[in-house]
Image (cartoon, coloured by chain):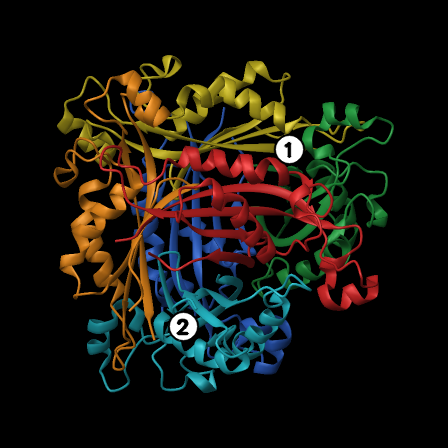
Chain colours: A cyan, B orange, C yellow, D red, E blue, F green
Amino acid sequence: MPVLVTRLERFNAGHRLFRPELSDEQNLRVFGKCSNPSGHGHNYVLEVSVEGHIDPETGYLFDLKTLSGLINERIINDVDHANLNVDVEWMKGLNPTAEVMASTFWDRLEPHLPEGMLYRVKVQETDKNWAERLRELK
Amino acid sequence: MPVLVTRLERFNAGHRLFRPELSDEQNLRVFGKCSNPSGHGHNYVLEVSVEGHIDPETGYLFDLKTLSGLINERIINDVDHANLNVDVEWMKGLNPTAEVMASTFWDRLEPHLPEGMLYRVKVQETDKNWAERLRELK
Amino acid sequence: MPVLVTRLERFNAGHRLFRPELSDEQNLRVFGKCSNPSGHGHNYVLEVSVEGHIDPETGYLFDLKTLSGLINERIINDVDHANLNVDVEWMKGLNPTAEVMASTFWDRLEPHLPEGMLYRVKVQETDKNWAERLRELK
Amino acid sequence: MPVLVTRLERFNAGHRLFRPELSDEQNLRVFGKCSNPSGHGHNYVLEVSVEGHIDPETGYLFDLKTLSGLINERIINDVDHANLNVDVEWMKGLNPTAEVMASTFWDRLEPHLPEGMLYRVKVQETDKNWAERLRELK
Amino acid sequence: MPVLVTRLERFNAGHRLFRPELSDEQNLRVFGKCSNPSGHGHNYVLEVSVEGHIDPETGYLFDLKTLSGLINERIINDVDHANLNVDVEWMKGLNPTAEVMASTFWDRLEPHLPEGMLYRVKVQETDKNWAERLRELK
Amino acid sequence: MPVLVTRLERFNAGHRLFRPELSDEQNLRVFGKCSNPSGHGHNYVLEVSVEGHIDPETGYLFDLKTLSGLINERIINDVDHANLNVDVEWMKGLNPTAEVMASTFWDRLEPHLPEGMLYRVKVQETDKNWAERLRELK
């Protein structure tokens, strides 16, 4: 029967939603206030869930300190107090919506976890908006 | 791989849980304090999640401003600061439990979203009670 | 040096803001959506703070179980799942705004606490609106 | 189409993560600060979700007062203000991680609910760490 | 006896903490990660409290819809989805720390409220950091 | 005009409320479930506020990174994942109620801050109970 454990991390970052091939006016029409050329930002909340079996010896499915370390090393260290359009090598050329971030963060974590263990990546942008990439339970 | 985006909206409403064919005493036995004849109310929290693919051009799965507009137009405008037993045409005759509300709100939204996109409707009544209508991931 | 302890309690209630001598239209102009004749409601959060000295024997300023009991007996039992305009004997004739409630609840609690101990009563109506009655620190 | 209702309950408990066959130093290496021999504790948040159909007569999938009563009787009464390593008969010999707790609580509740109704048990240990046992939707 | 009412508003903005007369390295030493030259941002929470007497006719100390309108007109419309270092005319030349923002927002609101009514302005930057400008109770 | 900045920190700890000169039964009568001999615990939230003037050069009243460092060095490092009755040298002999903790933490911090700067120490034990030690504004 599936068991999940989740680790939550927070980071603060700046971003601007826009497509470089569009004018400021066109971007305003598509992305609204989020396309403001000088940018804005958020207190992002990132949740990462893994699925697996409980190790009968330790009672752990996966050590959340290890998971926290991985999330920090692969993601937080690069995005915290950064401008997501400018400062993050592996986000270059991406429009940093919450759903693009959830999907990109998944790709950053997945190869560094035991195969098939990553279950969900959730990126919360505001108290009203968030995105998730996830798979079916096994 | 499935991706979800979610929009949260809030509204305040009054309601009473009861069945009109029962006496006040009988309703008290079934619905407890929630059947108080002069009604009570809640700060409801409504979350709506849609599933789909990220548009590579915009980075959006679905524009959350559009989703918010739809939720307001189809639901919030009618239920906010309303009495759910009396004021809402499309809830007439329903007993406004959280699960009935989640299910009814689903039916209000589903035909106005791209086919198959609606994934989950969650209605939170208090910090301890909530209901969800949802489907399998695609 | 002042020390405070606070107890938080929750209740759900219905209310309508209006003045009986005004027409529905006039009430709508003054109280907006809150004057809807069939009422609405909230998940209220009530915080009660008392000020005093720590008893060196027990380490308690005031036993929060006792404070909780008093709040329930004097307030919550009457207002929970009630309609504040109709069901509460000691609120009859009052317009149940958050500030009127904070002030009325103060008067309900103050005579039942050691003299001069009550420090603040806060009534939160929504995540965005609240009222407090309080005094200077001693 | 699946509908869920969820009840949240809170409890405070003490625990220590360790394996009795290891030395304090070895436990420190595996469980970090959580293995402190004199223990620590948490404000746990427990969420229990059930899946089913809405009764067209009552509008209830499952009465949340009944669910709350069951959770209290089978779990909260035993674990609240308890030391999870010492005081709870049915947790003896278990290492009280959040995932072990979610799994054990599932087993405490499942036989007392209508067959196949239990959907998810979530145990939140801190604002950053939680575990869930759940099944596929029907 | 003093009574307060409070209105909470949210906005998202970008900022950078730095002094223009310092080099990037010097700014890094004083302001840490917050001085990142390409900026970052926050989901700010703004609370505004006013003190006064309850109008016995309306039950209002001050209409919170009016207060909300004033906060939006004088502050939120300018700072939401803006870069605080660049886009806000009345913040030009200020280093946008939370305490500078609380103090500046006070000055924006105070002349537009009845004399002596403004009691506190709180600006929350993250779940761990906030600033307040306030006065004694009357 | 007074300005405050606040830093919030979290820690998890175990405790038991009791007086050593009383029997377990007597302690149960005074402290209820909190006197359980094998202890329980909490996710504590600690808020520390300081009052002062904004430095016109930096825009800081007091650097919150410095305040966070001080709180960790003087308090969190000792109490986190500790048993408050047993493991903390400077709490020996104290009954660890929230008000005793707020008062003791004040004494730990006050001599290490600029004179007269400490304004409030708040210790939250559960979502319903907390204590504060504070002084008048200057």
Q: Read off the residue under disc 1.
A: C4
Q: Are marks 1 and 2 on the same chain?
A: no
Mark 2 neighbour density, 10 Å: few (under 14) some (14–19) many (20 or more): many
Check the image and report above or below for A84 versus A59. Answer: below
Query: Could you tell me which residue is drawn at 31 percent across and 41 percent down?
Result: B98
Badge 1 sits on which subunit? C
Answer whether residue B114 is visible to the viewer in this image: yes
Task: Look at label 2 and name its amino acid.
Answer: Ala
Query: Could you tell me which residue is drawn at 81 percent across and 38 percent down?
Result: F94
Q: Tag 1, which secondary structure?
A: strand
Per the model, the C-alpha gap separating discs 1 and 2 is 43 Å
Answer whether residue C84 is visible to the viewer in this image: no
Q: Is residue C90 left or right of residue A80?
A: left
Is the C terminus of chain F in the top left, top right, bottom left or bottom right quadrant? top right
Location of residue B2 (image quadrant) = bottom left
Along the line of sight, the residue nearer the viewer: E60 or F79: F79
Location of residue B99 (image quadrant) = top left
Q: Tag 2, which secondary structure?
A: helix
Q: Read off the residue under disc 2.
A: A102
